[in-house]
Structures are given as C-alpha cells and as structure tokens.
Image (cartoon, rainbow, N blue to C red):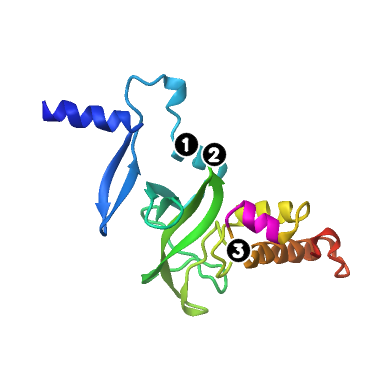
Amino acid sequence: MRRRRRKGAREALGGKEAHPVGGRVSWELKRQPAYAPRSHRMQLKTILNRLEKHKSFVYGSMTLDESGLEPRLLIRIKPRRGSRPVCSGCGKRGPRYGHGEEREFEYLPLWGLGVFFVYWMRRVDCRRCGVRVEQVPWSEGKHRQTRKYQWYLAKWAQRLSWQVVAEVFGTSWQSVSEAVRMAVEWGLLSSGNDGNHGDWDR
C-alpha cells in the first residue's frame, strides 16, 4: 500500500522525486511515467545531445535547485570514461592531474528557469605548460557563461539596451557586457574590422 501511494505521489509531481540536500528540498528530474505518449517522452538529455553535444563529455543528473530566490536547473556534466583533458594553455591533450574546483556555467534559460552546467574541472599535467586547468568546449577561458549563452545575450544586446537585456534574462549588466565584448572580438578577428563596434556601443 505504501509503495502505491509513493508511486502515485511521484507521478502526480510530473515524474519528479524530492531529495533533501543540505537542509533544503531539491527535485531531481526523473523519466516520465510509462503511460505517457511516446512522442511526449523526449528527455532533456536528448535535446542537449542534439544542440550541445561534446565528444568527450556526457550529461549526468539534472536537478531543480530551489535554495535561492529563483529556482535553477542544474545539469551535471561528466568526462567520458577514458577521455583525456585538454590543456587550457596550448590546447593539447594530456594526462589528468587530479581535480580542481567545481564550476557552474550559465546556459540558455529554459521555461523561465536559469540553466547551469555543473562540472568538476580537471587539472592537466601538460608537457609544454606544466600543470594547468583543463579547457572545456562549452566555455572560453575563465568565463562562467557558455558560448551559446554569450551569443544569445550579444544578439539581444543589438536590439535592446544592455540593462534591459540583463533584467529580462535575469543576469547582470556585467555578463551582458562580457558577451558583447566576446562578439566584438570575434568579429574583429574574423573580418579585420578597424574597431568600429556599430550597434554594440550602448
């Protein structure tokens, strides 16, 4: 009887199961009930693997974090078994030299939720550069935003003021500024522009 009640409660929550984490409740996204139409059962991992697939990494658990003022969707990323990290200095692969810090990278918002990739950065024992933090394919350097999110903000910053873009997408003016700087630098390198920023100057 208890099993039936627990199963029914889980299905009533749309396939989400609650887990206490650090004194708060965190919802882990589970597979939809078996009776759901097959066409409605496409998982978020499937979509991510179509839009944001990286050869040496796999998507892990997805958790709805409600500990702050606004809920966030946390998507954990793990290195594929046997893969070697890439040196952030020279771009060459090398043997792993332990783990560094866990970082969050802001991704495109979904259903009004802030979406973040969560990943434990590895260190690389590089022959050329020594021990360096690895370079990940979804972000550049020390940026805490993914490349796709930066382009997303930069494109909107051509149409709206930076402050409005920051308010609409729940980020900071500084984040929008960094996204625009990235787009400008990319444009200068690609076209040999003389430094005129055009619609980006706001």
- Measure the alpha-carbon separation of dots 3 and 1: 30 Å
Local packing at callout 3 (Cα closer than 10 Å; few below 14, some 14-19, many 20+) is few
Whether 155 is drawn above or below 99: the answer is: above
| Res 4 → quadrant | top left
* Front residue of this view, candidates 21 and 187: 21
- Measure the alpha-carbon separation of dots 1 and 2: 6 Å
Q: Mark 2 sits on what residue?
A: 50
Residue type at numbered disc 3:
Ser
Q: What is the tally of numbered marks visible in this picture?
A: 3
Label drawn at residue 31: none
Residue type at numbered disc 2:
Arg
Secondary structure of residue under mark 2:
helix
Q: Of the residues tagged 3 and 2, which is closer to the observer?
A: 3
Q: Are marks 1 and 2 in contact (CB under 8 Å)?
A: yes
- Figure quadrant of the C terminus: bottom right
Q: Which residues are magenta?
A: 163-170
Give the residue drawn at x 44%, y 64%.
Answer: 103
Q: Are marks 3 and 2 in contact (CB under 8 Å)?
A: no
Looking at marks 3 and 1 on the same chain, the residue that comes earlier in the sequence is marked by: 1
Secondary structure of residue under mark 3:
loop
Local packing at callout 2 (Cα closer than 10 Å; few below 14, some 14-19, many 20+) is few
Q: Is residue 169 magenta?
A: yes
Counting from the top left corner in percent of width and height, residue 13 is at 33, 33
Q: Of the residues tagged 3 and 1, which is closer to the observer?
A: 3
Q: Mark 1 sits on what residue?
A: 46
Q: Is residue 51 left or right of residue 9?
A: right
Counting from the top left corner in percent of width and height, residue 52 is at 54, 46
Q: Is residue 108 magenta?
A: no
